[in-house]
Amino acid sequence: MLLDSPAKQAKTTPPYDDASIVRRIEACPKLGSLQSINRALNSLLNSEHSLNSQIAEIIRRDPSLAARLLRMVNSVYFGLSTRVNNIEEAVFFLGMRQIRELAMATPVIEDLERLQRNTTHVLPWKELWSHSIGTALLTREILSAASTEIDDDTDYLVGLLHNVGKVVMATAFPEELTELMKITTPTPAAFCEAERKLIGWDHARIGAFFLGRHQISEEIIQAVRYHNCPAEAPGYQNFAAAVQVADYLVRHAGTSGGFETVAPIEQDSWLKLDGWKILYGEDTAESALANTSLANILQRLPALLQGLVQS
């Protein structure tokens, strides 16, 4: 059932004040992976003289990373005729960029999983991880299609971390999250409005504050804070815009945001988003070309995510 005023279906008490929200967020444990994401591996990947065997040896030391690597390379996405069981072969097939993406995603997901174990709620965590990784992959593709030059992995990280506020909500505001999960909204932005009415802050603001405690770079914080309203971002609008578009595309491909229920995302509805207009303009040749390119990527996304996220 689609509701016009979702917050009315939840509790009617006033939302928390800023100080109360901050205290609850600060009570959440910090995440080590946000300050040190596989530094040894990243250092090796960034070296011009790295050998596949050296990279494979580091990956072997991390059973979770190794398992994700093999699932990814053997997914339908790659269409290999024989199964790969050797880490060095997997490194060869995937290439440096995708190994780096996997190295970033694995410790973050594991840390977030440890954080959510403090909750008593049974929540669809796999959907959240799938959505986060899918958004990370598409954010990178979207910015590339917009000819935005990125020298590091910020484009991937803004997508990966855009919903970290939801994990914090599960720990800091479990009762409110339970109420929010009972409602359906027409858009992701409408769900944020319901969060603000019920809690005082939405998951984007909660996530941005949480990342600020970890001294994450300002462009990532801004992208997370404004990923549902990129036109309002005081800086780094391209990052926030790309995450907004990626979020819509991943939902359209069948991977929900995790905890909330949002009406189905219609084909090409992302062309009307502020984020799309910021990146590509309206009714331009660049816009049409980007939409075609992203449609091709969307076809491969479900199989790729199946290889990355554990069943």
Image (spheres, rainbow, N blue to C red):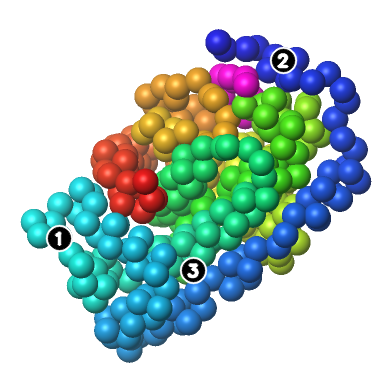
Q: Distance between the residues labelled 1 and 2?
A: 50 Å
Q: Residue at (60%, 57%) from the top-left corner?
A: 114
Mark sitting earlier along the chain (3/1): 1
Identity, as a three-letter code, of the amino acid under mark 2: Gln
Count of residue discs: 3
Q: Is 189 a magenta residue?
A: yes
In terms of depth relative to the viewer, which is nearer, 207 or 170?
170
Residue holding disc 3: 152
**Quarter of the picture holding the N terminus:** top right
Per the rendering, the mark at residue 6 is none
Q: How far apart are marks 3 and 1 (CA)?
A: 32 Å
Residue holding disc 1: 83
The image position of residue 215, as x and y in percent, is 71, 66
Identity, as a three-letter code, of the amino acid under mark 1: Arg
Mark sitting earlier along the chain (3/2): 2
Q: Residue at (28%, 44%) from the top-left corner?
A: 303
For discs 3 and 2, the disc positioned in front in the rendered view = 2
Q: Is 147 a magenta residue?
A: no
Residue holding disc 2: 9
Would residue 25 be seen by someone viewing this image from the given angle? Answer: yes
* Left or right placement of residue 94 versus residue 175 in this view: left
Q: Which region shows up in magenta?
A: 182-190
* Left or right placement of residue 139 versus residue 68 in this view: right
Q: Is disc 2 surrounded by few (<14), some (14 to 19) or many (20+) residues within 10 Å?
A: some
